[in-house]
Amino acid sequence: MSTEEAPRSVLPYPPIHADAPFVVLSDWDGTITDKDSNDYLVDNLGFGFDKRRELNLECLSGRMTFRDSFKEMLESINHPFEECKEVLKKNIKLDSGFLNFYNWCKNKKIPFVIVSSGMAPNIKSVLSTLIPEINENQNKENEIDIIANEVLFTDKEKKGKTWEIQYRHPESGFGHDKSQAILPYRNLKHKPILFFCGDGVSDLSAAKHADLLFAKVMANGHSDLKTYCEREHIKHVPFRDFNKVLERVKDVVEGGKSVEDVLKEEGN
């Protein structure tokens, strides 16, 4: 367990899966989905790709916090929140291997937790569109816990004509420190094996705390998380889609391989 003081959370957490021998935690945007929904909004409804990428690189280099860079990106989107949701529902798709992996986890009763620096209403809206049995308006977790930020409607009518992100950890440079979704499992006596999947700068806080880390690589070979892991010498498994994640998680859950075996086979 980290000796650093945990950042204050202004949003509740779902209960941890205290009895599970394996837990899968995953980033949402650009990892489970075919593209980053927030990037899509910024590029198409906000100040565009060039400025967004400039802020991404500032964050990756450590010159700017993710919290501040992401807030600046979202502030460039001057469109009602419901309009943004509809744009995402029409344009965001799932990773080609995700449904197979998700259904395998369900069948194996392995908890699957989305840990996102995006906003929960957007995630629920897209998820319920792409996986119809998940109803975005239900309070029940529907077998996928979502740990994310929220949205605040700032217009007088509170209908989302204007809005801003509500960070889970407003005092953290990450805005949402994803490591806080992983670290409670480290205090469990039976020490479950934790798998984490991510792709970008918002996943940096979680990267060091998973047992087996998967870093998604885009079709063009780009991956901010992979770049970070290589620079910081963090062992990881690169993947193009969740078919690779399924293969390697199966190796551990069903095939009897250790995490160390998998990492060694992947060149770590």
Image (cartoon, rainbow, N blue to C red):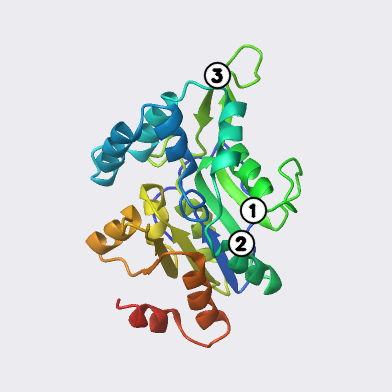
Relative to the observer, which residue lies in front, 44 or 123? 44
Looking at the rendered structure, the kind of residue marked 3 is Thr
Residue 43 shows in the view: yes
Q: Which image quadrant: the N terminus?
A: bottom left
Count the labels in the image: 3
Q: Is residue 119 left or right of residue 226?
A: right
Residue 188 shows in the view: no
Residue 117 locus on image (x, y percent): 48, 43
How far is disc 3 from disc 1 in space, using C-alphas? 27 Å
Q: In this view, does 119 lie to the left or right of 172?
A: right
Mark sitting on residue 145: 1
Residue 262 locus on image (x, y percent): 41, 80
How far is disc 2 from disc 3 in space, using C-alphas? 33 Å
Residue 191 locus on image (x, y percent): 54, 73
Q: Residue at x 40, y 84 (%)?
A: 261
Looking at the rendered structure, the kind of residue marked 1 is Asp
Looking at the rendered structure, the kind of residue marked 2 is Phe
Please name the residue that numbered disc 3 is placed on: 162
- Secondary structure beneath dot 1 equals strand
Earlier-in-chain disc, 2 versus 1: 2
